[in-house]
Image (cartoon, grey):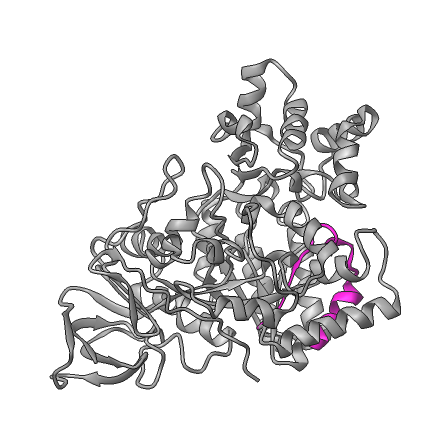
Amino acid sequence: MLTITGALVVDGSGTPGYHADVAVDDGRIVAIGNDLPGADRTIAADGLVLSPGFIDMHSHSDLQILVNPDHTAKVSQGVTLEVLGQDGLSFAPIDDPTRAVVRRQIAGWNGEPDDFDFSWSTVAGYLGRLDQGIACNAAYLVPQGTLRMMVVGTSNRPATEAELARMKELLAAGLRDGAVGMSSGLTYTPGMFATTGELVELCEVVASYGGYYAPHQRSYGRGALEAYAEMVEVARRSDCPLHLTHAVMNFAPNAGRGADLVAMIDAALDSGVDVTTDTYPYLPGATTLSAVLPSWTAEGGPDALLARLRDPAAREKITYELEQVGTDGCHGCVVEWDTIEIGGVRNPALSSAVGSTVAALAARTGKPAADVFYEILLADDLATSILQHVGHEENVRTIMRHRSHTGGSDGILVGGKPHPRSWGTFPRYLARYVRELGVLDLADCVHHLTGRPARRLRLTDRGLVRPGYAADLVLFDPDTVRDAATFPEPRQPAEGIPYVFVNGVPVIDDGRRTDALPGRAVRRTS
């Protein structure tokens, strides 16, 4: 038995903290009180806050959690559960031809690990691999884009009745296997080719299994509010709970418009639609460099896209759309090359580009920015990841305060200079937005990061410090906790988080990463 004494217990419910001792045994919280009986180990936690482990509602660790199961990036910041399978593209369910395309398409998110064992094809198989030993717990969303690629392919056309029926069968099987819902990537091929009606029918299946829908919608720029409205309509028509992932209002047209999004969500909630959101506490976003392209370029898959990038006539058309019209890949906005920073490359010959914007690379080489853009995409086989500096602080704070809000890192762990949110999201909430700015108070912030996301996931034994709950716990110093990860040095563990427990086992112990891998797959419950 372990007893933690003297901590300020902030229990994840949103209510003010209280001082108490907490006893843990066999992976569960067994008692909360004062002067609890002796234990095999006692941690004196005076001056520290004890909270539930943080839940990362939007993570891209799908392969990295298996390749590097110590997962220091997440557990060092107090994450004890993350939700994988995001943005409509992941690795279960899947067949061999689809896997080959998906691996190339999202190498910028997951890397391209050598000699990796892709022996699963179903959600059950993937979750079983997670159960073999990971640092933190993980839940999974069935990716709608992968379903469409398996059944329809990469063509821009409506699914036939038979194809939609097959996608629904695959989705239902994944939900029966334990997936917590479905994700979409509606600015990524081929998920973007789904009609609203197709999404409604898929979401009806999700709702019937008690899951939720987590869309990366069709725009976060010029058409953001219209795109959010479409997702609310999908939820309304399908009666499916909706979780708006990385709920931002980015790019110049949306400066100061966070309140418009909040008003839309309030109206939806008041009318009976079940809506939640997640955000990361940073201004830049992150994606792949190829995502900036207009969607028509990706029809037919990666090889067809690369062929178009080599064709002078196609390049001229693409450049005109990027620089004069605005592409759906750039969320309806004209590309600003000085906002696109290279975050990671697979081709080592391109490593000198990491950390520079496309505009800076163009100035360095004397070439047009669009030509530099094409050269990188071709030389890196579309695997380049980027940071996109298009956010607005006022919007970040407005959305963060909302009653629907939870935390999600949207963290990409690969690349020379990944976004620091992969290592710093949760301590940044506590340091910058609680202690320094007072945007949230401590109990409310912890609720956003623990109890509220657990409720969205329908977990009845996680997200709170309560007897009988799983001992996913974090001890942090409210005066010193902070994100040490920066844009120049993004792979820096958090400070002020000396202890993290996953299923009662210490993964961070007195500030040091242990070798424990107590995490497992968390499956949907009815």
The answer to which image quadrant residue 207 occupies is bottom right
The answer to which image quadrant residue 51 occupies is bottom left
Residue 18 as seen in the image, left or right of residue 149? left
Image quarter of the N terminus:
bottom left
Q: Residue at x 40, y 38 (%)?
A: 487
Residue 287 on image: x %, y %: 57, 44
Residue 445 on image: x %, y %: 36, 64
The one nearer the camera, 428 or 300, is 300
Residue 45 on image: x %, y %: 16, 68
Q: Residue at x 62, y 33 (%)?
A: 380
**Where 317 sits versus 59, above or below?**
above
Residue 242 on image: x %, y %: 61, 69
Q: Residue at x 36, y 55 (%)?
A: 429
Residue 184 part of the magenta-drawn span: yes
Residue placed farthest to the top in the image? 366
Residue 262 as seen in the image, left or right of residue 102? left
Residue 140 part of the magenta-drawn span: no
The one nearer the camera, 309 or 392, is 309
Residue 496 as seen in the image, left or right of residue 334? left
The one nearer the camera, 434 or 206, is 206
Report the label total.
0
Q: Residue at x 15, y 64 (%)?
A: 47
The answer to whether residue 404 is visible is no
Image quarter of the C terminus:
bottom right
Which stretch is magenta? 180-205
The answer to whether residue 370 is visible is yes
